[in-house]
Image (cartoon, helix red, strand yellow):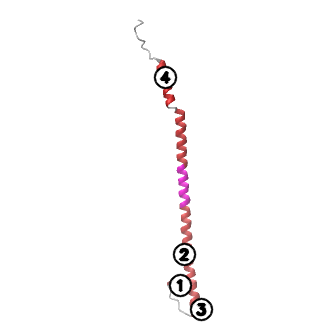
Amino acid sequence: MADEEDPKPDISKFSVIRNGLFRLFNFPLIGSTVLILLFYWRLRLRRRRVRKQTIDGLLGVIKEKDERITHLLHQIARMNELLLATRHGVPITSKAASG
């Protein structure tokens, strides 16, 4: 009976394989690294979104101010033509003065 092999699995070999896997794949370290990478990725996306909203808002303000400046320039042109017309007694036929 001494020649018969024991049908039980060798626990020491399983233990070595399991410990080797834990040394090769340190699951808590990998998990924390993945969490840090996900947090960093989310932070970058949020920053990019906020930056885009800020840029869009600034472009909107610039567009509004540009339209206001254009309107004021037209008003100045009309007032200049009216002033010149009243000084020289010339009838006003300009498009800027009539609009």
What crowding class fits label 2: few (fewer than 14 Cα within 10 Å), some (14-19), or many (20 or more)? few
State the count of labels.
Answer: 4
| Label 1 or label 4, whichever comes before in sequence order | 4
Mark 2: which secondary structure?
helix
The reply to whether the magenta stretch includes residue 47 is yes
Is the magenta region chiefly helix, strand or loop? helix
Pointer 2 residue: 70
Start and end of the magenta stretch?
44-55
Mark 2–mark 4 distance (CA, rounded to whole Å): 80 Å
Looking at the figure, which quarter contains the N terminus?
top left
User: Which amino acid type is marked by label 4?
Assistant: Val
Residue 45 screen position, x and y as percent: 52, 50
Pointer 4 residue: 16
Mark 1: which secondary structure?
helix
User: Which amino acid type is marked by label 1?
Assistant: Ala
| Label 2 or label 3, whichever comes before in sequence order | 2
Pointer 3 residue: 87
Q: Residue at x 53, y 57 (%)?
A: 52
Pointer 1 residue: 97
Mark 3: which secondary structure?
helix
Mark 1–mark 4 distance (CA, rounded to whole Å): 94 Å
Q: Is residue 8 above or below residue 76?
A: above
Determine whether label 1 and label 4 are within 8 Å by CB: no
Q: Is residue 15 above or below residue 46?
A: above
What crowding class fits label 3: few (fewer than 14 Cα within 10 Å), some (14-19), or many (20 or more)? few
User: Which amino acid type is marked by label 2?
Assistant: Thr
The reply to whether the magenta stretch includes residue 48 is yes
Task: Give the foreground label among 4 and 3.
Answer: 4
